[in-house]
Image: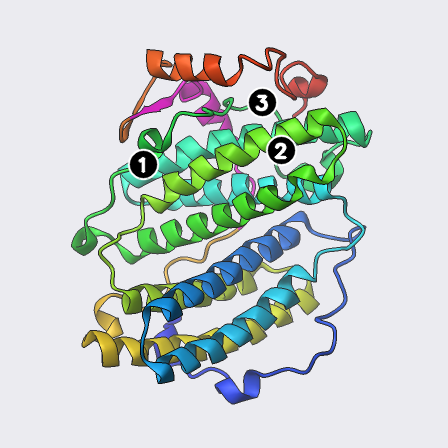
Amino acid sequence: MAFNPLEHRGIPLDDQLRDWSPPGVPVDPDDLDPYTRCRIITLNGIEVEAVMFSHHLAGTCPDAKVQERLRHVRHIEQRQQKTLNWLLPGQASVLETTIAYEQVAVDLTGWVARMEPDPRLKRAYEFGLLEDFDHLYRYADLYEAIEHRGAERIVDQVTEVTPGRLDHLCRGTAGTARRRWEREATVPLSRLHALTIMSAERQTMNFYMNVGPMYMEPIARQLYQEIGLVEVEHVTHYESLVDPGETWWERLVHHEYNECYLYYAFMQTESDPRVKAIWETHLGMELEHLRLACDLMRRHDGRDPESVLPSALPEPVAFEPNKRLVRELLATQIDYTTLGTGHVHEAHRRFEKMQQKANAEHPARPVGASRGWSGRQ
C-alpha cells in the first residue's frame, strides 16, 4: 500500500530536540556509494530551503504564537541540516565537492525529466540538464588541470563526463522564465519536482557564491564566476515553474510534504545502513512538521491540506544513471536556446550579441573546451 504521510504521526516536536554533541561521523570517502553522497547533498539543499522559507514566512506573519511555532520547527530543521552537511568528508577539496554537486544536478534533474508528466515542464528540465552536464565536464577538466586527478574517482563511472551545451551566459532572466502551470490541472508530482529542483539549484547557486574565491588560480576563479552566474539563471529558470498564487500556508505545507517525500524515497534505495537510519529518523521528524503545517493551513487559510495534497506519495525519486537520456538530448537538443518563454533551435541574434559582449575581455576558450575529456565514456 502506498505511503500517505497524512495518516502517520511522527516524533513529537519536544522529543526532537538534541544536545550539542557533534552531528555524527562523516562518511568514508574511500568506501562511498556516489549516490549516497548525492542523496546527502540533495537533502541538505532541501533542509536549507526549508529553513530559509520559514524565515521568509515568519517575516510576513504578525502572529507571535505562529512565529514561535515556526522558530521551534526551524531550530529542528537547522539541526537536521547540520547532521546532513556534516556527513560529507572533511578532507574533500572544494573542487571535489563541486563535482559532486554537479553530479547531483545531472542525475537528479535527469530522473525528474524522465518522470515528469507535463511535456512543457519536462522540456524545462531537459534544457537545464544539458547545461549542468557541461558544468560537470568543465569542473572535471579543471580538477585534472590543477589537482591532477580524474573525476571518475568521484562520480564512479555512474555519470558520464563529456561536453554538454555551453552555458547561455547573459541570456537574461526574461529569456529563462518559463510559463507557470495551471494550478488546478497540475498533478502533485509536478509540484514536488519543481520544488525539489528549485531547492537543489538554489543550494548550488549559494555554494558557488561563497566558494568561488577560494582558489588562487585565475582559471579556477574565472570558471567559478562564469558558472556561478549561470546558476543564477538556472534558479530563475526553475523558480518560474512554481506557482506564485499559492498562499504562504499552502507553500509551507508543500515544503514539509516534499521533505517527507524525499526522506521516504531515499530510504528505499540507501545502501549505507547508518545513513539510512538518519533518513528514517528525519522522516519521523518531518511527519510531525507536516502535521503542524497542516494545522496552520486549516487555521489561517480556512482550507483542508487534503485539498492540495495527494492521497499518497508518488513514485519515489531515485538516483540512477541517466546516460541514455543525456546522449539522446545531446543528439537532439544541443543547439537549443531560449527565446521569451520558449525554446529555439539556433542561437538568435540577441544571444549572439550578448555572448560577444560577455566574452569581449576574455577571448580565450573556456575551461573544458579543448582538453582530453571528450573521448571518455
Q: Which quadrant of the rendered structure holds the C terminus?
A: top right
- Residue placed under numbered mark 1 in the picture: 177
The picture quadrant where one finds residue 19 is bottom right
Residue 124 sits above or below residue 370 on the image: below
Circle 1 SS class: loop
Contact, mark 1 vs mark 3 (Cβ under 8 Å): no
Name the residue type under label 3: Pro
User: Is residue 243 visible from the viewing direction of this image?
Assistant: yes
Circle 2 SS class: helix
Residue 163's disc number: 3
Would you say 136 lies left or right of 324 here?
A: right
Would you say 308 lies left or right of 125 here?
A: left
Name the residue type under label 1: Ala
* Dot 1 or dot 3, earlier in sequence: 3
* Dot 2 or dot 3, earlier in sequence: 3
**Gap in Å between the C-alphas at discs 2 and 3?**
17 Å
The picture quadrant where one finds residue 157 is top right
Circle 3 SS class: loop
Queried whether the magenta region covers residue 329, the answer comes back as yes
Residue 91 image position (x, y, % from top left): 81, 51
**Gap in Å between the C-alphas at discs 1 and 2?**
23 Å
Residue 34 sits above or below residue 313 on the image: above
* Dot 1 or dot 2, earlier in sequence: 1
Specify the segment rendered in magenta: 319-339
Residue 67 image position (x, y, % from top left): 39, 78
- Residue placed under numbered mark 2 in the picture: 224
**Gap in Å between the C-alphas at discs 1 and 3?**
25 Å
Contact, mark 1 vs mark 2 (Cβ under 8 Å): no
Queried whether the magenta region covers residue 338, the answer comes back as yes
